Amino acid sequence: MGRLAAGCGKVIVEIDGYYENVLLIGKPYSISELRNQLVIIKGHCITMNEFADVFCRLFQYERLSSTSKEDIRPDIVIDTETDLVYKIRY
């Protein structure tokens, strides 16, 4: 688990997309739950520019500030271009 999230029962998710790459922190959902959430969010978004904001709003995640992103490894990646959701192995 990402070092920041390991002690607080949360997971770090990277949203990897054409328009933005952002790190989010929130509740640890399963890969299948995150895949379902990806489908839900894509149905709510008019443009992919708003994907991370809608994801945060609907599933109670928070963006990590740009200053806290250094040296943080995500636990899970959601690729909005390929619709893949996968766990990172380090």
Image (spheres, grey):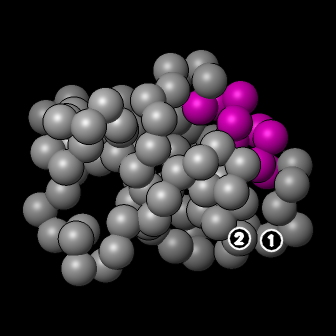
Tag 2 and tag 1, C-beta contact below 8 Å: yes
Please report the residue visible at 40 percent of the width from the left and 50 percent of the height from the top.
25
What predominant SS class does the magenta segment belong to?
Answer: helix
Residue 14: % across, % down? 41, 53
Q: Residues within 10 Å of mark 1 (few under 14, many from 20)?
A: few
CA distance separating discs 2 and 1: 6 Å
Note whether 80 is above or below 6 in the view shown.
Answer: below
Per the image, is 35 magenta? yes
- 86 lies above or below 46: above
* Foreground tag (2 vs 1): 2
Q: Please state which amino acid type lies under the numbered disc 1.
A: Thr
Residue in the picture at 72% in, 49% down:
58
Question: Quick check: can you spot residue 16?
Answer: no
Residue 69 in view: yes
Q: For numbered disc 1, what is the local secondary structure?
A: loop
Q: Residue at x 11, y 62 (%)?
A: 71
Residue 10 forms part of the magenta stretch: no
